[in-house]
């Protein structure tokens, strides 16, 4: 078993890599947070769950559950300075608690692995749409013709497999080269560019004549449209979109310098993530309403609405191609962060080295992704949990998405919150987080009481519902 040095480390003693600046960490963590979850998933789950009330619950979850847990995860990573499982164990032992707390990081890493398997499939969709846009396939398109393109992609296991393979290879290459050089540089350019393109698409959306309708859909709460399952999904999505409950912020925090204020940093990341999601909603729903599309269309929503917008705006092929390139990059930086913790763990526990670990984990994850691909076509009737009424008709893809986002992530986040809130010495939290007394008290209260109670209530309701 690995022997840990239980003494708190000073920076000079630590030989691991380090982010080159606070900004680099913010960009990398934002690169992880901002991804398909914001641009692909947020609009479609909002559409499926009736709009405004769902958005409100989601924003609440981000503010009072997401941000405090993000701070707790970064704290564990920075104190532990190892892979997430070892860091949790180390921080637990240092605080005279059971090393079994590392279960939260284990659950998180299992979730990260499972999520990457289907995330890569969807990243592949984004990649394939770059070509469609660039070749003018959307130009003058109608809702039907563009819907047809999407159905054709999903019906073709061969195409999906090729794009999934490409995406996974991109992720493995960066992770095997180590975290710093490539990733830091890439996010510095890509994140601002993504913002800019989103704003251009929102600009187009304002010209559709249905912008007001979209704003009221997103921001006027209609609690009648919200179900308890919707609340669970909002909670799960808050975790997913901030990359929480997956040991990722622990892994990234483990490279963070001591001089960085964790609280302010977490708030900045959450803010940027939320702004991108809301902008995506404002880009997409006006087009949905203007073209009589279904807001609750599900996972295909952005692949059927944005192309319509691009197909009907000046220079749409150019903007469309750029947009899907950026979507691919947003997904890529998130995909890298999904692979990172597992690879870090395999690397520290085997003799395979960085590249070997990245390749082995990547191939296994790719294999699991194949099951998701098949559930879109050849296995679309396979519903492994059909014996339970609630999972009737849910494919392997649906189940992986449901169990990771709605069960594993909140569970891992809950354990981390309880551990950091109740079992870590107050003085060490206080010293490390560097918050004012008032803010610290608010944070600790949220972590100790609000997060656990909220997550548990939502879980129980959902079991009974
Ligand atoms: N937060 C990313 C998104 O919203 O697309 C997805 C993601 C990345 C989830 C990394 C989880 C994760 F660990």
Image (cartoon, rainbow, N blue to C red):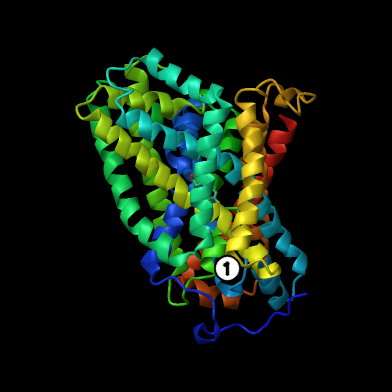
Nearer to me, 299 or 352: 352
Which residue is rendered at x = 54% and y = 81% of the image?
15
**Residue 431 against residue 195 in the figure, above or below:** below
Quadrant of the image containing the N terminus: bottom right
The residue at the far right in this view is: 387
Rendered location of residue 20, percent (x, y) = 40, 72
**Residue 169 against residue 53 in the figure, above or below:** below
Rendered location of residue 240, percent (x, y) = 54, 45
Nearer to me, 463 or 100: 100
* Mark 1 Cα-neighbour bin, 10 Å: few <14, some 14–19, many ≥20: many
Nearer to me, 310 or 86: 310
Which residue is rendered at x = 73% and y = 59% of the image?
103
Rendered location of residue 249, percent (x, y) = 54, 60
- Cβ at disc 1 under 8 Å from ligand 1: no
Residue 392 horizontal side relative to residue 312, left or right = right
Quadrant of the image containing the C terminus: top right
* Res 311 seen here: yes
Which residue is rendered at x = 51% and y = 28% of the image?
299
Q: Secondary structure at mark 1?
A: helix
**Residue 41 against residue 341 in the figure, above or below:** above
Quadrant of res 146: top left
Write down the residue under mark 1: 77
């Amino acid at each position: 078993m690995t022997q840990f040095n239980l003494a708190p480390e000073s920076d000079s003693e630590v030989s691991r890599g380090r982010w080159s600046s606070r900004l680099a960490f913010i960009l990398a963590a934002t690169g992880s947070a901002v991804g398909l979850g914001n641009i692909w998933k947020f609009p479609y789950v909002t559409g499926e769950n009736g709009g405004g009330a769902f958005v409100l619950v989601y924003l609440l979850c981000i503010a009072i559950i997401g941000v405090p847990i993000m701070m707790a995860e970064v704290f564990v990573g920075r104190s532990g300075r190892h892979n997430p499982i070892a860091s949790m164990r180390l921080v637990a032992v240092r605080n005279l608690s059971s090393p079994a707390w590392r279960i939260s990081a284990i659950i998180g890493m299992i979730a990260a692995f499972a999520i990457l398997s289907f995330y890569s499939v969807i990243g592949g969709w984004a990649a394939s749409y770059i070509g469609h846009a660039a070749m003018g396939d959307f130009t003058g398109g109608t809702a039907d013709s563009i819907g047809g393109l999407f159905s054709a992609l999903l019906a073709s296991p061969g195409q999906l497999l090729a794009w999934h393979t490409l995406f996974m290879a991109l992720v493995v290459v960066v992770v095997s080269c180590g975290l710093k050089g490539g990733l830091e540089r890439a996010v510095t350019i890509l994140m601002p560019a993504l913002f800019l393109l989103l704003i251009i698409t929102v600009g187009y959306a304002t010209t559709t004549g249905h912008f007001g309708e979209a704003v009221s859909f997103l921001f006027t709460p209609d609690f009648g449209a919200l179900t308890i399952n919707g609340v669970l999904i909002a909670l799960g999505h808050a975790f997913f979109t901030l990359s929480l409950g997956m040991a990722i912020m622990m892994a990234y925090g483990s490279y963070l310098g001591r001089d960085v204020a964790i609280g302010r940093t977490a708030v900045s990341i959450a803010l940027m993530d939320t702004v991108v999601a809301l902008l995506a909603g404002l880009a997409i729903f006006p087009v949905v309403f203007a073209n009589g599309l279904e807001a609750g269309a599900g996972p295909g929503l952005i692949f059927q609405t944005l192309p319509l917008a691009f197909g009907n705006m000046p220079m749409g092929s150019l903007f469309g191609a750029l947009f899907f390139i950026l979507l691919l990059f947003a997904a890529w930086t998130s995909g890298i962060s999904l692979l990172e913790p597992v690879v870090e763990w395999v690397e520290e526990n085997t003799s395979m080295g960085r590249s070997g670990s990245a390749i082995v984990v990547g191939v296994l994850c790719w294999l699991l992704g194949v099951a998701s691909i098949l559930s879109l076509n050849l296995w679309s009737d396979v519903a492994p949990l059909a014996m339970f009424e609630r999972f009737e008709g849910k494919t392997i893809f649906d189940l992986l998405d449901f169990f990771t986002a709605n069960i594993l992530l909140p569970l891992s986040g809950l354990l981390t919150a309880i551990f950091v809130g109740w079992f870590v010495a107050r003085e060490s939290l206080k010293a490390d987080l560097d918050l004012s007394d008032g803010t610290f008290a608010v944070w600790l209260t949220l972590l100790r009481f609000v997060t656990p109670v909220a997550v548990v209530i939502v879980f129980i309701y959902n079991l009974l519902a």
